[in-house]
Image (cartoon, rainbow, N blue to C red):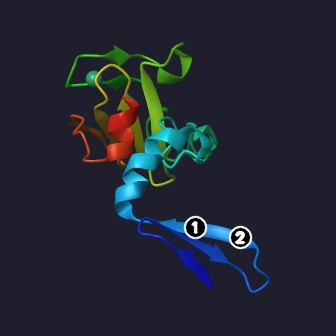
């Protein structure tokens, strides 16, 4: 059962208790900015670094060279000898897996730096930040 007006439809359970509301996209667009602080963050601007995964990779490091901690951003020239020791971080760890794929986010220009560890070499890819067409992010930055 529902009560309806043009923009808002209130929804009731069979006992007549209000359980929620449906609103039109039009109204939602207007209302959303007003209540955004009440909503859970859809995309937290900063996810915690997956440090545990980095530790695991170090633990099972089976490459024929020592663990490398240096990161360099080709896009803006930002660099560090040991990203983990920087405070504040010059590069944030964004992902890491046991295959030796380690990704960072350059905190200076937001480029993505991906280090791939192979048996005999380390390759580094730097991808400049491309702004996504995402209203939530636009509103936040
Ligand atoms: Zn950079």
Name the residue beneath numbered marker 1: 21
Task: Indicate left or right for 118 with 53 as reference.
Answer: left
Q: Is residue 33 above or below residue 16?
A: above
Q: Nearer the viewer, residue 50 or 20?
A: 20
Label 1 neighbourhood size at 10 Å, few (<14), some (14-19), many (20+)? few
Tag 1, which secondary structure?
strand
Residue 57's x, y, as percent? 56, 45
Q: Which mark is residue 18?
A: 2
Q: Is residue 74 above or below residue 25?
A: above
* Secondary structure of residue under mark 2: strand
In what quadrant of the picture does the C terminus appear?
top left
Quarter of the view holding residue 41: top right
Based on the displayed image, in which of its 4 quarters is residue 129 positioned?
top left
Rendering quadrant holding ligand 1:
top left
Q: 115 or 51: which is nearer to us?
A: 51
Q: Which quadrant does the N terminus fall into?
A: bottom right
Task: Assess whether mark 2 and mark 1 are in contact (beta carbons under 8 angstroms).
Answer: yes
Image mark count: 2
Q: Which is nearer the eye, 105 or 2? A: 2
107 in relation to 39, above or below: above
Residue drawn at (58%, 67%) of the image: 21
- Which residue is at a point 40% across and 65% down the rendered structure image? 24
């Amino acid at each position: 059962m529902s009560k309806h007006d043009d923009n808002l439809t209130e929804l009731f359970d069979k006992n007549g208790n209000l359980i929620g509301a449906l609103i039109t996209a039009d109204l939602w667009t207007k209302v959303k900015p007003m209540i955004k602080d009440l909503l859970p963050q859809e995309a937290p601007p900063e996810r915690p670094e997956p440090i545990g995964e980095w530790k695991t990779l170090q633990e099972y490091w089976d490459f024929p060279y020592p663990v490398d901690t240096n990161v360099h951003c080709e896009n803006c020239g930002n660099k560090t000898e040991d990203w983990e020791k920087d405070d504040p971080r010059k590069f944030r760890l964004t992902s890491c897996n046991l295959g030796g794929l380690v990704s960072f986010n350059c905190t200076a220009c937001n480029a993505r730096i991906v280090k791939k560890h192979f048996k005999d070499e380390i390759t580094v890819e730097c991808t400049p930040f491309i702004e996504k067409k995402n209203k939530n992010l636009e509103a936040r930055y």
